[in-house]
Amino acid sequence: MNDAALQAQSGSDEADPPLYYRAHVFVCCNRRPEGHRRGSCAAKGSEGLRDYMKARAKELRLQSVRVNAAGCLDRCEFGPTLVIYPEGVWYSPKTREEVDEILEMHLVRGRRVRRLMLTEQDRPSPKG
Amino acid sequence: MNDAALQAQSGSDEADPPLYYRAHVFVCCNRRPEGHRRGSCAAKGSEGLRDYMKARAKELRLQSVRVNAAGCLDRCEFGPTLVIYPEGVWYSPKTREEVDEILEMHLVRGRRVRRLMLTEQDRPSPKG
């Protein structure tokens, strides 16, 4: 397909549809074997935190919020990790109480829980 | 915690960190039992498409792009489904060729593949 055909097809002057979920939460539920040097979010309890977050979001009747499990988000060293889109804010909650804080502050009030957020510096070491 | 304390802690006047991934793709890999009335993305081949997309993104050396599997995104009727954040654009590719189109058009060129996109109207019927 040439560029003109691609452009005609892509209709890039149309706006994207509105967001389907106002907040889409992905909780890393990847599990690596015990003793792996990077660790993994599931080994740090992410599955239970994800189940709790999903149940609480439902109880709070948060509209247009979805909590999903996801495969490895590749920030294992800082896990358990989750990311909230479209804003792309990452958190590392260790307990149910911290999940509650994220629900109340971020998802209900539209604010942030700074001390639980990952920063730009929270990156895995280069491989090798 | 009272409101003032929450506010002090939230530091809402600070900007969020920059996006960790410029494009974060989530491919629904939920599998329901055969014959379920809503169907499921995995039953429609999403796992293979996700493996392919991940491998191709790597081969294309797409920088700061991550392709993840996700649990049920709840648009099963329109599957296989995937969503790309932060833009929140949803696609339903049925074949590897369609995955290639999304990679080339959306992730490389920053455009859209309109005919494969889900629309606002693509919602499950109300339950019951």
Image: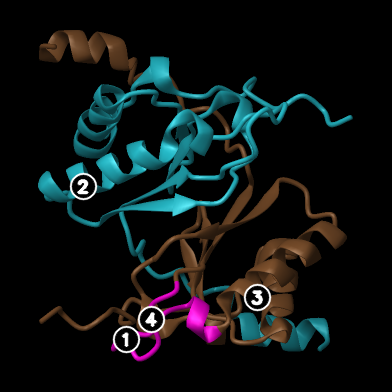
Chain colours: A cyan, B brown
Is residue B73 in view from this perspective?
yes
> How many neighbours does mark 2 have within 10 angstroms: few (below 14), some (14-19), or many (20 or more)?
few
Q: Magenta: predominant secondary structure element?
A: loop
Q: Chain of mark 1?
A: B
State whether residue B32 is above or below residue B58: below
Q: For mark 1, does the 10 Å Cα neighbourhood hold few (<14), some (14 to 19), or many (20 or more) residues?
A: few
Residue bearing mark 3: B49
Is label 3 in a helix, a strand or a loop?
A: helix
Tally of numbered tags: 4
Q: Mark number for residue B36?
A: 1
Q: Which residue bears the numbered disc 4?
A: B33
Q: Looking at the rendered structure, which numbered label has been put on residue A55?
A: 2
Give the left or right position of residue A96, taking residue A118 as reference: left
Q: In the picture provided, is B1 more to the left or to the right than B56?
A: left
Q: Which mark is residue A33?
A: none
Label 3 sits on what residue type? Answer: Leu
What residue type is disc 2 on?
Ala
Question: Is the residue marked by circle 4 packed among few (<14), some (14-19), or many (20+) residues within 10 Å?
Answer: few
Q: Residue furthest front?
A: A34
Q: How far, Cα to Cα, is label 3 from label 4?
A: 20 Å
Looking at the image, do the residues carrying marks 4 and 1 touch, with CB atoms under 8 Å apart? yes
- The chain holding disc 2 is A
Residue A26 or residue A120, whichever sits in front: A26
Give the residue type that dot 4 points to.
Answer: Pro
Q: Nearer the viewer, residue B89 or A43?
A: A43
Q: Percent from the top left, x then y, of residue A72?
A: 60, 46
> Start and end of the magenta stretch?
B31-44
Do residues under tags 3 and 4 come within 8 Å of each other at their CB atoms? Answer: no
Q: Residue at x 18, y 54 (%)?
A: A63
* Mark 1 vs 3: CB contact within 8 A: no
- Name the quadrant of the N terminus of chain A: bottom right
